[in-house]
Amino acid sequence: MKTANPRSGSVPVKSSLLFLCGLMSVVFCSAESFSLDLGGGVSLELIHVRAGDFQQGSPVSEPKRGTDESQRWVTLSRDFYLGKHAVTRAQFERFVADTHYRTEAEIGTSGGYGWDGTRLKQAKQYDWRNPGFPQTADHPVTLVTYSDAMKFCEWLRNKTGRAFTLPTEAEWEYACRAGATTAWHNGDAEDQARAIAWFKPLAQFTTHPVSSVRSNAWGFYIGGNVYEWCRDWYAPYPEGQVKDPLQNNSNLSDKPRRVLRGGSWLREVQHTRSAARYRNDPASRNADNGFRVMSYENPLASSPMIPPVEKVDEPLPPAQVRELARPIEPPPQRPRTELHLRHTVGFGLALFPLLFIIGVGLFLLIILAKILRSVFQAGPPALSRNASQPVSRSFSSIIGQDGFWMHADPSLIGSTIGYAFWFENQRRQGEVIFQPDRQGQQFIYTGSSPEQVEILGVVDSEASQEATDIQEDSTVDSIPPTITPSRSRFPSAY
């Protein structure tokens, strides 16, 4: 018997196995991807990411790593869907056309930060339609604030009936790595990053089509091009293993900033590493800030993202079919005799004085409770003096899982409304321009379910405008970053 040469025979066997594995992965990925129809021939594709464990951050041996990338083991216990790439100009344009939404750069008097040929410069002319360089429909949308991104997610929720939001920092890195432990999801060498990301100077100071680079092992086009907003407030990583981490504390940095991930066309290659972290004021509207959306797995079959599964029942035996087809007779009713009626009325008359006494007692207790509450319980603090008008119109709120819905009189559309909510016994306050959906309500994202909500009323337009101008003037250029070691051990962003 002749023995086959194992070296010569291993090549075709290995090639066949690789081909079959590749074919199976293509079939699996296609089954795990879903496309949402946004109208006008525009769609948004999301990829299913299964729950799992991974090591977030970078080892100390990784070149050009940041001091805020300490490693920790993370468990993600929930499957989720993540956008295949950053939200594009075409997708954002569908949102604006459907809702007539105006971004914060468009509403503000100073505009956004666009590219003037040498640096990011703030001017009224710069907004998502004009970042300072030409874009096409498949380029990532830029000059969007954290709030603008959340409004897009809210629109998707209203359009599909499914909750959408931004990914957490851990979910973003988990999807970016796609199982890799290297600096980039395709290797450790900077030259390898050129195949998967747009960065300075390779990008030539402009964005590029979202699918113009190579995707990672899970099918995501991720890293470079634009920074992407995440749900977390920026802070050091807590030590030890964590489960489903989301940083809700905004007071652990030099000043409250939201996390951004991925690097951009304006930053060097090291910022496109999987573990690289960045952050910015949530109201920043810069020409290298974008976002991608995510949604947790939803069991509802009515969701347009997951096609309903048709259930086929086996045929029943003929005897059971006849039994089910037989009409159901109503139970016999006992005749209501005159004696029975008399006893019922007599029993009711006997109970009437007792019920009356109980009702009066409850009414008096309610009145007493309201008086005691007004005397001994201090209400929530109101807005600062001259900051808002008294609440003279109809307002209501409904608390949700990660925020609350606000309902107000339709005549207040376009007005700035102040609100306050409590989370972990801490009062937080904010303002929002009332732009309700078709049901006449507006969702306010708070990051978690608030303990209590109060609608404070219509904010004075002059005071609101002055606050807006102060906020915009406080935003500084993104290059070079200012370092303030006296206030924080982390360099500040933008």
Image (cartoon, helix red, strand yellow):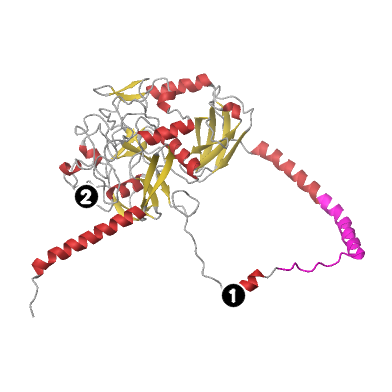
Expressed as whole percent of the image width and height from the top left, the position of residue 149 reads 41, 36
Depth check: 191 or 61 in front? 191
User: Which mark is on residue 182?
Assistant: 2
In this picture, is 279 found above or below 9?
A: above
Q: Is residue 342 visible?
A: yes
Q: Residue at x 47, y 38 (%)?
A: 155
Depth check: 494 or 208 in front? 208
In this picture, is 349 found above or below 255?
A: below
Foreground: disc 1 or disc 2:
1
User: Which mark is on residue 318?
Assistant: 1
Q: Quadrant of the N terminus?
A: bottom left
Of the residues shown, which amino acid type is indicated by label 1?
Answer: Pro
Expressed as whole percent of the image width and height from the top left, the position of residue 173 reads 31, 47
Q: Residue at x 37, y 39 (%)?
A: 252
Expressed as whole percent of the image width and height from the top left, the position of residue 177 reads 27, 49
Element under disc 2: loop
Q: Which residues are magenta?
A: 328-357
Q: Quadrant of the C terminus?
A: top left
- 260 displayed left or right of 332: left
Element under disc 1: helix
Contact? badges 1 and 2 (CB < 8 Å): no
Give the crowd class for mark 2: few <14, some 14-19, many >=20 residues within 10 Å. Answer: some
Expressed as whole percent of the image width and height from the top left, the position of residue 334 reads 83, 67
- 443 displayed left or right of 483: right
Depth check: 30 or 368 in front? 30
| Magenta residues, dominant SS class | helix
